[in-house]
Image: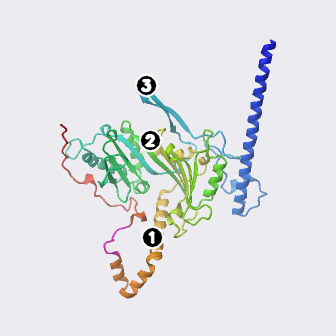
Amino acid sequence: MAKENFNTLVPFTQDLLNRKMFAAALDAQKHNDRENYMNSHVSCVSKKLAIDTAVPAQSILKSAGLLPPFTNRGGKSDTPSLASFEALEKLDFISLGRGGHFKTVATPKPNQAADMRYSFLDWVTFTFRVSNLPLQLDTGRYAQVDLDYVHSLSALLYQVFGYGVVCQRASGMNFYESSFDLGYNGWGIVCIGGQNDTCSVTVKGQGLLAAKPGWEKRLFDLLNKIPQAQITRVDLASDNFDSKLTVDDYLKMYKADMFTSRGRPPNVEQAGNWIKPNGKGRTLYIGNRKSGKLLRIYEKGLQLANGFHEKYPRWLRVELELKNQDRVIPFEVLLRPGQYLAGAYPALADMHKVQDVIQTAKNTVQSTFERSIAITNHQFGKHIWTQVQILGVEKTIELLTKGKEEIPKSLNFDTFEQFTEQDFLHSHNITPSAIPVHF
């Protein structure tokens, strides 16, 4: 080997060795970070379960069902380590655009090792161009103006969700000219007018709980038939009514980089009283709504009770909000929400239970009803007692409820089985609106 080549190779080799030594040192530091977190987590678990901390960390976490998730690659692991620092959110990257202008966007991928039932849908918004979904009126004519179009759309949404559009709202919203109530008690909203000839449909959590079972597949089929339709927002929720993990545990996981993807930790914020919890519930926010990916982990049972009772003090909800900002939300998320939630962060790969949406609805009703009783007792109990002593029970109830014969929206009593309302826009025959003439 020539001397000049040898002199060039030596510093290159030394630099390569230095990099390997640095990487090895970094790996060792990460290993120590994992061990430190695990030891603190084991200590916490030991105190809760009154077990000897001398028991190996692996057996403690495993026997307690608290072994933290390791990676988002799926499956179980017997090695007592934390999330792989190389574990990433499951994504595909695709190019969108036309006319020579393209941008690369992310597409969430499911963790197929997880159960599809680990999560349920708590919010869905989709949009489409009106011209890509022509609809006919009862007369057989195609709808030409917005009011007529929403009249026909109501019938289509009724087929999907089991309820349709009720009435027009006083004003538009979300930069649309007109808005309409979908279902009752704030279940959903339809927006139309302007916005590049598009229509937006939003169904919120209570509206999805009240929807006719199987709506997910029916909406999936509908969206696949509409050219260029998009899901612009979807919320994936997972409830644990007797969670052994707390929001404090998830904060520790965040500090241990178990929510880190692609090398950069996401934003984190805390809401509620974390110094002296007051029974009204705490929330941990991970991510940023502006980036299109926000995770909320919160004490759902305490939030519903709002400090008036503690019927479900260990009810913890993990909820992921995805928006189509620099990402495309695949329609398959409607059918496999649990797998998409598990693929969102390394920390969520292994933590879920199969969801029981019916139990979520029942617990919500019971919690909000008990809160209603507690609020009435706290604020008006003395007045009601006095009125009963003077007027009697029947006369008091008659006077207190006159003109109030309806269930408050806050009680969340609605389920599809209990829902009997059939008065929707499409149930009324209408004459097509006149098409405005522009001169």
x and y percentages locating residue 44 in the rendered image? 70, 59
Q: How far apart are marks 1 and 3 (CA)?
A: 59 Å
> Image quadrant for the C terminus?
top left
User: Based on the displayed image, in which of its 4 quarters is residue 400 positioned?
Assistant: bottom left
Cβ–Cβ under 8 Å for marks 1 and 3: no
User: Based on the displayed image, in which of its 4 quarters is residue 231 positioned?
Assistant: top left
Q: Which mark is residue 331?
A: 2
Q: Which mark is residue 100?
A: 3
> Image quadrant for the N terminus?
top right
Residue at left offset 35%, top offset 86%: 391
Q: Residues within 10 Å of mark 1 (few under 14, many from 20)?
A: some
**Span shown in magenta:** 401-407
Q: Which mark is residue 255?
A: none
x and y percentages locating residue 161 in the rendered image? 37, 51
Residue at left offset 76%, top offset 41%: 28
Question: Could you tell whether 267 is left or right of 8 in the image?
Answer: left
Q: Residues within 10 Å of mark 2 (few under 14, many from 20)?
A: some
Three-letter amino acid code at disc 1? Ser
